Image (spheres, rainbow, N blue to C red):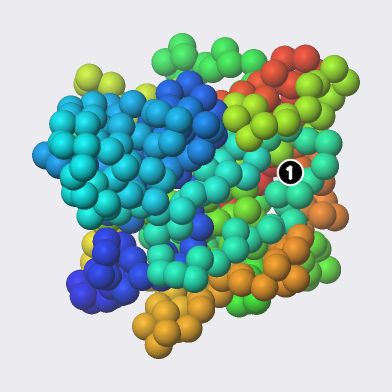
Amino acid sequence: MLTVQQNERLTHVGPGTPMGALFRRYWLPIAGSAELKANPTKAVRLLGEDLVLYKDRSGTLGLLEASCAHRRVHLLYGIPEDNGLRCPYHGWLYDSTGQCLEMPAEAPESTFPSRVRIKAYPVQERQGLVFAYLGPEPVPLLPDWAPWNRENVRWDVGLAIVPCNWLQIMENSMDPVHTEWLHRYFSRYVLQRLEETGKRSKDEHWRPPPPVIPHVKIGFDVYEHGIIKRRVLEGGSEDDVSWRIGHPVVFPNMLSAGQIRVPVDDTHTLYVWYQAHPMEPGDEPQVASDDVPVYRVPLPGVDEDGIPIWELIDNNSGQDNFAWMTQGPISPRHLEKLAESDKGIIVYRRLLVEQMRVVEDGGDPMNVFRDPAKNKDLYIPNEAEEGDKTWGYRKERTFKGGLSTGSSGKYSVIGRQQASGQGAKVPERTAGV
Ligand code: FES
Ligand SMILES: [Fe+2]
């Protein structure tokens, strides 16, 4: 249990908050590059700040505060020019540093443009994602996580704005026990509901949930890049890879570099599913960042009678989503009753508190990299390297991103293409995380 004040300190991310200061030390994904190809401007809310991402006609990306300095029109409607974004109302032009370059209605000799600058933040692209940095200078390096360097793969990006605070999503990742219930026992109940209501999923990618295998032991170790989660399932032992190697949470907000949870504000989170799919014969390689397809993942909900829409929760991502969302916009942790099986959550909260203090003391928190020599192919241990027969992991399936599970599962663009080509060889479910 936390006090109301402790909960606020851990969950609030706006400017001037301790957790906001911690998150402002990291590059955070805000969009898929392909979104800018389709539309050159995108409204972005990040860490409680309203911004506009744009691509100008020279191909330069910029991230500006959302409102024009003149009379506050939203720059989502801005016009990309050769060297920046022009406000649609009176034509003020801004470059990617936020500097105003032109005020067409003012006298040519006016020096006013040189004295107007709006907030602007650095952005960079990597394999289909646009990352932003909202923190103080000097700007750190974008981490070079080893899973992002896979060769002979194609990437896709799934996006959803989940209407709840980021912390309840991250805490779910420190809670292995939920997988046997939510993704297996409950999954079987969903199957029953679909069958009883005549709505059994006809989706070719859907597979029945595997049997429930109880956890008999869970463990959590802080390591250099985050927390390693370990488990022994009934019938297994500590010799299993799920205990020996375990699987990682990369601090502060990633699962093995493939699922990234980005605080939009205190009550919304951008969920990014970032998946690599091995290339198959005939596949065109992805050359430009905007060759990487972007798809939306639908959120679960209820119908007009208040009945759960079971088709949206027959997969792990839908199940996790309702578990996060239904705790409320910010989970009221002063009402929670943590048990022994919640010890991973306590380990994670302690690490957050420790790393907030590091920032308050003027230091660099975990996973901030400044030396290029030390930012190369950063290794993240993962049981999937060896495969885990007990829990159902297979190296190639996990590598593939899986077509279900805590991944974006059945909605993945490339996953669906590959599965269609493979007919009956659709990969089975991998473990929830
Ligand atoms: S409001 Fe933007 S130029 Fe006037
Ligand atoms: Fe889950």
Q: Could you tell me which residue is drawn at 50 percent across and 57 percent down?
A: 27
Residue at the far bottom: name it.
361
Q: Is residue 19 left or right of residue 184?
A: left
> What percent of the width, then of the height, locates residue 331?
28, 58
Amino acid at pointer 1: Thr
Residue at the far left: name it.
71
Check the image and report above or below for 1 versus 142.
below
Q: Is residue 282 left or right of residue 191?
A: right
Check the image and report above or below for 306 versus 369.
above
Q: Could you tell me which residue is drawn at 81 percent across and 29 percent down?
A: 279
Q: Toward which corner of the image does residue 292 lie, by quadrant?
A: top right
| Location of mark 1 (residue) | 398
Q: Nearer the viewer, residue 344 or 185?
A: 344
Q: Could you tell me which residue is drawn at 74 percent across and 21 percent down?
A: 418
The answer to whether one can see residue 428 in this image is no
Q: Nearer the viewer, residue 154 or 394?
A: 154
Q: Could you tell me which residue is drawn at 48 percent across and 83 percent down?
A: 363
> What percent of the width, then of the height, locates residue 188?
54, 34
